Amino acid sequence: MLAAFIVTAATRGLPGVKELVGRIFKWRVRTDWYAYSLFGPVVIFLAAAIVQGMASGIWPDDSAFGRSAEFPGLGLLGFWVLQTLTFGLGEEVGWRGYAQPRLQGKRSALAASMILTVFWAIWHIPMFFYRAGFASMNAADIGGWLLSLAVGSVLLAWFYNSTRGSILMPILFHGSVDVAFTSEAAGGSVTLIMAALLIVWALLVVALGGPKNLSRYGKHVIEDKRAENGGAT
């Protein structure tokens, strides 16, 4: 997030910074986008829980949804706020707010999302040295994790372009999906089923929105020109 503000100030000046802040707080979007971003991951979890329960007879503890072993005292709301402000706000201002609209200026939104996935993965490398979940990954785990980043990039670009440049929607979705995947209720088959459902969701986005825009509403592009009027379209 800090890098996004520094580079925006250097390339587009104060007008660019104001425009970036405006997109962070761009809340006037259709109500259904709030539903998709906030509750889409919850629906994915419930669907995965039902599939696992019907297939194996083992039902996850729904009361553990949103309960974190890492932050046991927070509860669902507190954990969601933490994930949204750190991984959501802290990352998405840079990834979708700064990088996405520039990368997709001269290429398709899908290509931009895949390029962004590479840098998103590199950004996570330090976590392999201090977070147990990352440090314990084997080659297959890392491959699955990279796939999850690619899927996430597609879905987050879909939110961003479909709301015509709102960074708020990717922020909310990022926080919600992190809660769904890292709470104590997830694990084992539930996590795998949720991942499969997210892949299906991303494939539908590509099929219905098209690789060019990943949205039926076009794509939001920014040109880095230091001018009083920004180059957003």
Image (tube, helix red, strand yellow):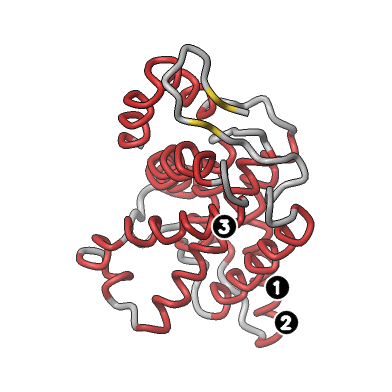
Front: mark 3 or 2: 3
| Badge 2 element | helix
Q: Nearer the viewer, residue 29 or 150?
A: 150
Q: Is residue 158 above or below residue 60?
A: above
* Circles 1, 3 touching at the beta carbon (< 8 Å): no
Q: Which mark is residue 111?
A: 3
Task: Find disc 1 in the rendering and name its residue.
Answer: 50
Q: Is residue 135 above or below residue 11?
A: below
Instruction: Tell me what residue is drawn at x 58 percent, y 70 percent.
Output: 195
Where residue 100 sits in the image (x, y, percent)? Answer: 51, 44
Please tell me which of labels 3 and 2 falls first in the chain: 2
Label 3 and label 2: CA atoms lie apart by 38 Å
Label 1 and label 3: CA atoms lie apart by 34 Å
The amino acid beneath tag 3 is: Ala
Where residue 62 sits in the image (x, y, percent)? Answer: 59, 64
- Name the residue at the bottom extreme: 56
Instruction: Tell me what residue is drawn at x 69 percent, y 30 percent.
Output: 29
Q: Is residue 58 left or right of residue 102?
A: right
Q: Is residue 9 above or below residue 192?
A: above
Where residue 72 sits in the image (x, y, percent)? Answer: 36, 55
Q: Residues within 10 Å of mark 2 (few under 14, many from 20)?
A: few
Q: Nearer the viewer, residue 148 or 109?
A: 109
Q: Is residue 59 left or right of residue 144?
A: right
Instruction: Tell me what residue is drawn at x 55 percent, y 42 percent.
Output: 172
Label 2 and label 1: CA atoms lie apart by 6 Å
Quarter of the rendering containing residue 88: top left
Task: Find disc 2 in the rendering and name its residue.
Answer: 54
Q: Is residue 89 left or right of residue 186?
A: left
* Circles 3, 2 touching at the beta carbon (< 8 Å): no
Quarter of the rendering containing residue 4: top left
The amino acid beneath tag 1 is: Ile
